[in-house]
Amino acid sequence: MKKHKKTLPIPEGFSQRDIKTESSACTGEKTIGFYSAAEKKLVYAELVRSEDDIIAFYERYGLEYTERS
């Protein structure tokens, strides 16, 4: 039996279009989160080690990941 995971609500003031990934210029470390134009930074950011982490981030918020070029 598959365990149903509880999805998180998208933070207020954000939408799927606000999800961005950023890479550190120094270390190349990648993060994903909701981009806040007001703060000019990612909020609710998480470390990305692989494409699976990106997919998991979208799924956590009940969204479907579609690869962007």
Image (cartoon, rainbow, N blue to C red):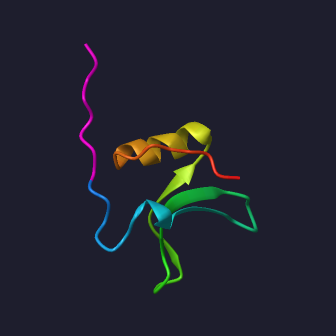
Residue 1 lies, with reference to residue 13, above or below; the image says above
The location of residue 20, given as percent across then percent down, is 56, 63
Q: Which residue lies furthest to the bottom in this view?
A: 38
Residue 8 lies, with reference to residue 16, above or below; the image says above
Q: Residue at x 48, y 67 (%)?
A: 18
Image-based side of 15 in relation to 69, left or right: left
Q: Residue at x 51, y 44 (%)?
A: 65
Q: Residue at x 55, y 37 (%)?
A: 52
The location of residue 50, given as percent across then percent down, is 62, 41
Question: Which span is picked out in magenta?
Answer: 1-8
What main secondary structure does the magenta stretch of the protein show?
A: loop
Residue 43 lies, with reference to residue 46, above or below; the image says below
Is residue 2 located in the magenta-colored stretch of the structure? Answer: yes
Depth check, front residue: 13 or 43: 13
The location of residue 45, given as percent across then percent down, is 47, 62
Is residue 60 located in the magenta-colored stretch of the structure? Answer: no
The location of residue 3, given as percent across then percent down, is 25, 23
Q: Residue furthest top?
A: 1
Image-based side of 4 in relation to 29, left or right: left
Q: Quadrant of the N terminus?
A: top left
Residue 25 lies, with reference to residue 48, above or below; the image says below
Image-based side of 12 in relation to 14, left or right: left
